[in-house]
Image (tube, rainbow, N blue to C red):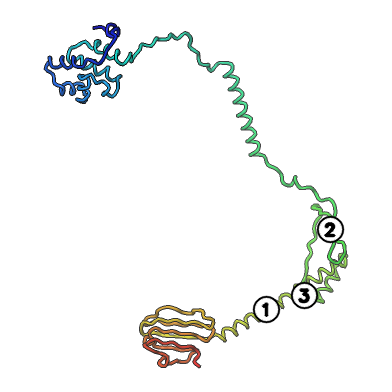
Amino acid sequence: MSTESIADQPEVQRFPGERLQAARLAKGVTVEKISSTLHLPGSYIHALENGELEKLPSIVFARGYIRSYSALVDVDADEFIGYLDALYGQSQKTRAVRSVTKVRQQVKVGHPVVKTFSWLLGAVVISASVWWWNTQNSVIDPVSLLGEVDSAISVETSQGDTLVIPPLDDSAPTESSEVVVDSNPEAVVSTAEKDTQPRSSTEAALATSEAVRSVAEPAVDTEAVAAEAASQQDRAAALSRLTMNFGGECWVTVKDRDGKSLFNNVRRSGDSVDVTGDAPFSVLLGAANGVSSFKFNGEDVDLGPFSKNNVARLTLPLE
């Protein structure tokens, strides 16, 4: 049966898969053999033989399954493909091949447009390189940016006088001025008056004030240092000292008059504590029998009256 005859039939109810099954049985081939040869699951083979093509993964694949199955059992594959097309329509149609009438050529390197663009790009790159080189290597003389001061400067002092500073002249030699400071302010004033150069009253007053200040300031600083040293000595003399030596383990806490902790730690046999501060001291000893020596300002203190359950609490100096 040809494909044209199948397509002309008014009704095709189902795929005749039982004919494929009959051809397989006639050749004595089992479903397992067909499945193994075609590398298909057995359910696909049963779907073909039962005409249940909708159970296959795709009608497109069904065409290949039918051709392979037909070749194994020696039946006409085109006949069964015709039944498939009648049931589900022509799934593949031959597309006409269109002839190529014109092929666009690529622009060649020698094309005028390519040449023009290359020249413009090269010119831009060269210009940018020259500009960058000039900006990186140009040196600006800072002296040329400064204008010369060719006019005198007038400054008004706090006394109401006007001090005129002449313009600087680098070509003229400068005379070094030397100021001699004497321990006697009057000698400094007389030296300033004997200066050979004429000076205004404002300049003389300023020079005298600076000379007097330079002589007086060291004396003030010396007095301040001496007063600070005396104050520190007085404070050191007013501080109290507590020393302890230990023959066993003991917890020690010592606080000064302001409640500041001077010592707060554990001492062991052979250790010692030496603290100074503002009295009265508040002392706590966690194991009084571990203290071998206890002195306040160089005097021994007996811890017995202040110990209870081997814990000593006392305030120094004793009242």
Q: Quadrant of residue 99?
A: top left
Q: Position of residue 300 (x, y in %)?
A: 45, 92
Q: Residue at x 19, y 11 (%)?
A: 75
Give the labeled residue for mark 2.
165
Distance, label 3 to label 1, CA atoms, is: 22 Å
Ranked by sequence position, the earlier of labels 2 and 3 is: 2
Query: Can you give x and y, in whole percent of width and height, for residue 24 in the image?
Result: 15, 16
- Residue 117: assigned label: none
The answer to whether 72 appears left or right of 164 in the picture is: left
Q: Label 1: state its secondary structure.
A: helix
Q: Is residue 163 above or below residue 42?
A: below
Residue 182: which numbered mark, if any?
A: 3
**Reading the chain from its start, which is encountered first: label 3 or label 1?**
3
Is 121 rendered above or below residue 213?
above
Which amino acid lies under the numbered mark 3 shown in the image of this protein?
Answer: Asp
Residue depicted at x 69% and y 80%: 223
Q: Amino acid at mark 1?
A: Ala
